[in-house]
Image: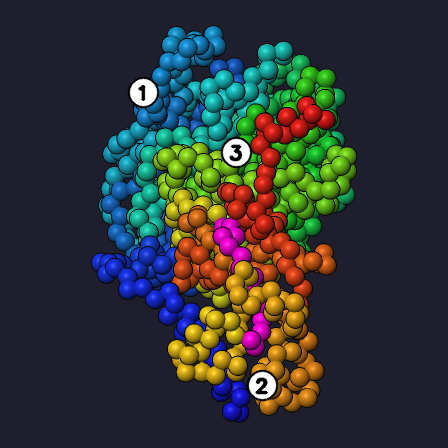
Amino acid sequence: MKIFKYFLFAFLFVSMSTFAQNEIKPERKPGHTNQNKFKQLYDEFATPNMFRTGSGAPGPAYYQQQADYKMDIEIDDVNAKLYGNETITYTNNSPDELTYLWVQLDQNMRAKDSKTPLISGSGIGPATTSSRAVGSYLKERFDGGFNIEHVKDVNGKDLSHMINRTMMRIELPKSMKTGDKFSFNIKWWYNINNHVKDGGRSGYEYFEENDNRIYVMAQFYPRMAVYNDVEGWQNSQFWGRDEFALPFGDFDVNITVPADHLLDGTGYLTNREEVYTKDMMKRYNKAKKSYDKPVMIVTQAEAEKTEKTKSSKKKTWKLSAQMVRDFGFATSRKFLWDMMAVKIGDKDVMAVSMYSKEGNPLWEQWSTRAVASTLKSYSRMTFDYPYHKAISVHAPMGMEYPMICYNFGRPDKDGNYSDRTKFGMIGVIIHEVGHNFFPMIVNSDERQWTWMDEGLNTFVQYVAEQDFGEWNPTALSEGQDKYPSRRGPAKNIVRYMGGNQDYIAPIMTKGLNTYQFGSNAYSKPATGLNILRETVMGRDLFDYSFREYARRWMFKHPTPEDFFRTMEDASAFDLDWFWRGWFYTTDYTDIGVKEVKKFAVTNNPNEDGKKLAQRYNRDPNSLVYFIEEGKEGYDTAMKAKSSIEDLPTVKEYIMDNFTAEEQKAMKKSPKYFYQVTFDKPGGLVMPLIVEYTYDDGTKEKITYPAQVWRLNDKEVSKAIASDKEIVSIMVDPDLETADVDTSNNSWPREVKESKFDNFKNKVKD
C-alpha cells in the first residue's frame, strides 16, 4: 500500500499547492445571515400543528365547515332578471365559537356604486374607438348588484345584517359552538348582465337575429365564505380578479325558466323524465352506452326550430348535488346537446356539451371529445373523477364551476375556422373541465392564492393537451406531430422571466396585486411544475407525489405549504431551493460556459511542477502533472498521446492496488483533460445540464443536480477526463430550464449574425 499512500499525498500536494498559489488574505467583511439558496424554508413556512402536519397532510384536528343550500331560482327571460330564494344551513365544525357569519355577495362588484372601477389607473390617449368613448364617458354604469329583500331565520324573524360591498355579515341570535347548525333564509334579485358587452364571469349573450339569449349563470346566489384554521374568515373583498373561496356542501336547486329552454348544471337532474321529451330520453339512454362518439340529444335542426318561437309557459328543472363547493347552470332555447360515456375507474361518467348553431361544425366535432379526454388525463394524474358528469357550454369566455364550465371558440358565419380557433377552443375546454379537479375538489383558496388553482390546473392542462393530440391525431394539422400547447414548455416562459423586473411579481403574491396576471398565475407555476417533472425529479417521482397531494387534499382546503411539503414528503426530494427561487422570488435562469481549460497529463514536470514539488519536499518524478494548454511542456505531453493509465507512476499504483480482474474492469483510458467553469449570472438555481460533443461526432449529456451550486452560487468548475477530444460544449441544449440568455450557453462561443448582417448577406446573394 506504499504507492497508494504516495499517490494520495501527491493528489493532496497538487490540490494544496493550487490553493497556495491563489492564497490572498481577504479583506475582512461584516458577518451576514444565511443567504444560501439551499437553506430550508422554515422562515417562510408556518409551524406545523394539529390541523396541518409537517408532511403536508391534514392533521388529526383538521376540520372544515359545511354549508348546505336549498334554492328556488327563476329567470325572467323578458327582462333579463334573476329572482332567488335560498335557505342555508351552516354547520360549525371548528373548535371556535362563532358570533356572526360572513356571506359573499360577488355580484355587488357589478353594482352601480361599486368601487372596482376606481382602483385601477386610467388616462387619456391620443385616440380611441367610438364604442370605447361611449362606454367610458357617456354610458351609464350597468347596475347588476344584489338586491337583498330580506335575511330571516327559519321562523321568519329578521336577522341583523350589514353589507360591506361584496361581503355581508349576519349577526347570530346566539353564538355557535362546535357542532352547532344554524339555518337562515335570504331572498334576492338582480339584473343579469350582458357579459359580451359588459364583461363578467356569468350573464347572457344576446342574439339579435331571433331575439334570444344564452344564459351561463354563476355567482348568482349569496354564498357562504370560508372559515378555517389558517386565517379565520376569508372575507377579502371581491374586486373582480381574485376568484373564490367556498366551503363544501349539498345543494338542492329548483330552476324555473321558459318551457322551451334546455337547462343543465351542477348536480343530478332529478326530474329528467318530466323535462325531457321521449326522443331526448331515448337518445340519453343511448348516450350512456356510447363510449366512442357523442350522441345528439337535441339536434341542430331541432334547436333552430325552437329558437324561432317563444313559449309563454314555464318549466322547472330540479338539480341535486352532494359535496360540491359551488353551483352553476346554463339555459337557452338555442342549445344543441350531445353526450357520451367515459369509463373512469369502475364507473361511467357522462361527457356533455351544450352549444348553439353558431358553434358548429367545430363544437359538434370536438367539444365532447375534449371533455372525455380531459377526464381521463386528469384522473390519471390525480384521482378518479368522482362526479357523474362534466359539461362544456359554448360561451364567449372561459369559466369553471363544479360539473359545468363555459368555453369560447367560434367559427365564422360560414362555419370556417383556423387552427388557432380550433386549438384555442380545445385548450380552453381542457383547462376549464380540468378546474373540476383544481379547485372544485382540491379546494384551494383562489381569493388569496390564484396560482394554486390556475397554475396547477394549467400544468395538468399541458399534460392533457399532449394526451389529446396523441389520442386524437385527426385533430392535428399537416406537419404537426403533437398538440401545440401555449403554456407548459420551459422555452415559452423565457420572454416573461427575462422581462422588466419593475413589472414582475413573485408567484407567491395575491392575484389582485400581480403584474402580468396570466404569466404570473398560469404560465410560470405551470412551467415550474413541468420543469420539476421533466428535468429535476423525473416523471415517476413527480407523478407519485403530485397524486399524493391531490388525494390527500381532495374535498379539503390546502395551502401552498401543504403542496410544497407533500411534494417533498412523497419523493425524498429536498425542493426548498426550487420553491424559494421559482415561487418566492423573481429570479431568472441564466447559466453559461465561462471558461474551458485544456490539460495534458504527464509524469514529466515543467518548471511550475518542479517548484511545487520542491515547496512540499516531494520527488518531482513521482507525481502526475496536469499541464495547462499554452504552458511549458503541454505540446510535448500532448504529442506523447499518453493516457493517464500509461504513466509509469499510475501503472505502478494500479498493479500494486488492484487485482487482475479489477484492472480489466478499468475500461476508461482518458488522455484528454478539461476544466470547464460554468457561471450563473442569473439568480435562479437550476440543474446544470451539459451536452459534450466529441471529435468523433458522438455526444454525451450530463445533468448535474442543482446542488452543484450549493457552495458557490456564482460559478462552479468540473474536471472532465475523456479518451476523446471535446470539440463543443452546450448548456441546456434542449431548453429545459427557461434560460433567458442562451448567448453564453456554448463553447466555443457561437457568434450569432445580427439581423442587419443577415439582411446584407441576403442582398449579396
Q: Do the residues labelled 1 and 3 touch (CB within 8 Å)?
A: no
Residue matched to label 3: 399
Q: Residue 506 sits in which quadrant?
A: top left
Q: Is residue 601 magenta?
A: yes
Q: Are marks 2 and 3 in contact (CB under 8 Å)?
A: no
Residue matched to label 2: 653
Amino acid type for the residue under numbered disc 2: Tyr
Q: Give the colour scheme shown.
A: rainbow
Residue matched to label 1: 113
What residue appears at the point 31 percent right and 48 percent down from the top-left corner?
231
Sequence-earlier tag: 2 or 3: 3
Q: Residue 742 sits in which quadrant?
A: top right
Gap between marks 1 and 2, in whole Å? 87 Å
Q: Dot 2: what SS? A: helix
Marker count (numbered): 3
Amino acid type for the residue under numbered disc 1: Asp
Q: Where is residue 280 in the image (x, y as percent from the top left)?
A: 71, 32
Gap between marks 1 and 3, in whole Å? 25 Å
